[in-house]
Amino acid sequence: MERGRADSRSILGAWGAAPLEPETVAAVRPMAGRLVNDILGSVRAASPIYADVLSGPEGVGIRLGIEQAVRSFLDAVERGQRPGAETGEIWRRLGEAEFQAGRTLEALRAAFRTGVRAAWRGAAELASEAGVPTPSVIALAEAIFVYAESLTDDVVEGYLRAQSDEATERERRRRRLGELLLDPNGYDAQAIEHAAELARWAMPRSLAVLALSDESPGAIPRRLDVDVLGGSDQEGAFLVIPDPDGPGRPAAVRRAVGSEAAALGPTVVPRDAWRSLRWARKALALAHAGAIDARRRYPIRAREHLATLILLGDEELAAALASDRLAPLLALPQVERERLIQTLGAWLDHQRHTPRVADELHVHPQTVRYRLGRLRELLGEMLDTAEGRFELQMSLRALRVLPG
């Protein structure tokens, strides 16, 4: 008996609880079944959610878990050892099952607290009925709370583990959906529909893709009021935004993006999602190169810069056009070159209306006429034909926006 008492003191000391006499355990053990019933009854009375659960098939597993916990506690005290690891794993599995059943962690914690109070109350009543001294009853209560705290950690760990596993799997499935949706080499409607179901993402009628400079979408998805599909590849991160032109959605996207460098592709049907991403990334690249002015706000909207996107769809061709059509001007000394290019641009913008050109340049109309005479010497018939003027406008725009 002395050794059992010493072992019990040792094990409870290791738990951080007061020593517990073996006689107290002996008084409680025969009534373990009653104690389990008291715990289940208290949980049923306190929680409508678990009242239904405990009455169904899931209640069998929970009851077995409680019975295992009670036996493991009593056996550990008598052996002078910690409770077996299998008990903790049982409760971790119960925590996983609670998450998979769709019940909240708050409801689980509340039910667990109710069960612990019932266990303490029931064990104390049984010990008192058996004539166990008050100090031993107090020690029993403390031991139960210490042990229950360990089980609480186990059940919460199991719940969070299942939650994390599902989040990881959901993220994996969404990445796969993004790969299928944005694949430029083919659109497999059936595969995408199946992938969307697995990823729990409702396929919209229209969407737009937001291209980001960073490798990760960061906090932008959390700041949006819609379930976006995020991902990244070797070119950077992206977000697929459903119904981008819906009520309030453009403003919400602007708020979510804030000052982060981003570009929004055109609104398209899902089949053309890859096009939206391609245009968005082109617009973002041109902004980084200084070809698109992004100082006013992000995200850059690709559809507002279609002319630049078309013109610089092939930068070599755009540069060749500017170099060829403006060659006589580019060969001039810098001061004269800049003055004539500025005059040419204003003349084309104002549809050859000399007074308006003079107003813009803050010079006398006669000065404009003199410069136009010089331009005619250098550019010849291009000033006199619609096609020539169009090419000059394109050339001037390329000159302005091309890097370098």
Image (tube, rainbow, N blue to C red):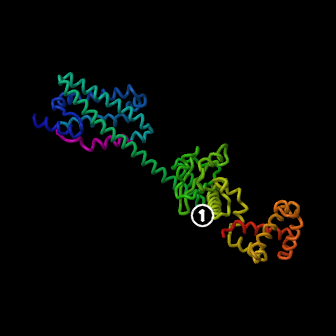
Which residue is more in the foreground, 248 or 103? 248
Taking 129 as reference, is 363 above or below it? below
Q: Is residue 75 left or right of residue 175?
A: left
Is the magenta region chiefly helix, strand or loop?
A: helix
Answer with the quarter of the image where residue 148 lies.
top left
Quadrant of the snapshot with the N terminus: top left
Crowding at dot 1, Cα within 10 Å, few <14 / some 14-19 / many 20+, comes out as: few
Q: Quadrant of the C terminus?
A: bottom right
Residue 251 placement (x, y as % from top left): 65, 46
Q: Is residue 4 above or below residue 34?
A: below
Q: Is residue 90 magenta?
A: yes
Q: Is residue 321 visible?
A: no
Q: Nearer the viewer, residue 293 or 127?
A: 293
Residue 239 forms part of the magenta stretch: no
Q: Is residue 338 left or right of residue 72?
A: right
Q: Quadrant of residue 58 in the image?
A: top left
Residue indicated by mark 1: 185
Q: Which span of residues is magenta-colored?
A: 78-96
Residue type marked 1: Asn
Q: Nearer the viewer, residue 358 or 205?
A: 358
- The residue lying furthest to the left in this view is 2
Could you say where residue 6 lies in the image, as x and y percent from the top left?
13, 37
- In x, y percent, where is residue 5? 13, 35
Residue 124 lies, in percent from the top left, at 24, 25
Left or right of residue 109, residue 363 in this image: right
Instruction: Give the side of residue 47 with respect to residue 271, left or right.
Output: left
Decide which of 345, 26 is in the foreground and name it. 345
Q: Secondary structure at mark 1?
A: loop
For the question of whether residue 222 can be seen, the reply is yes
Classify residue 156 by image quadrant. top left
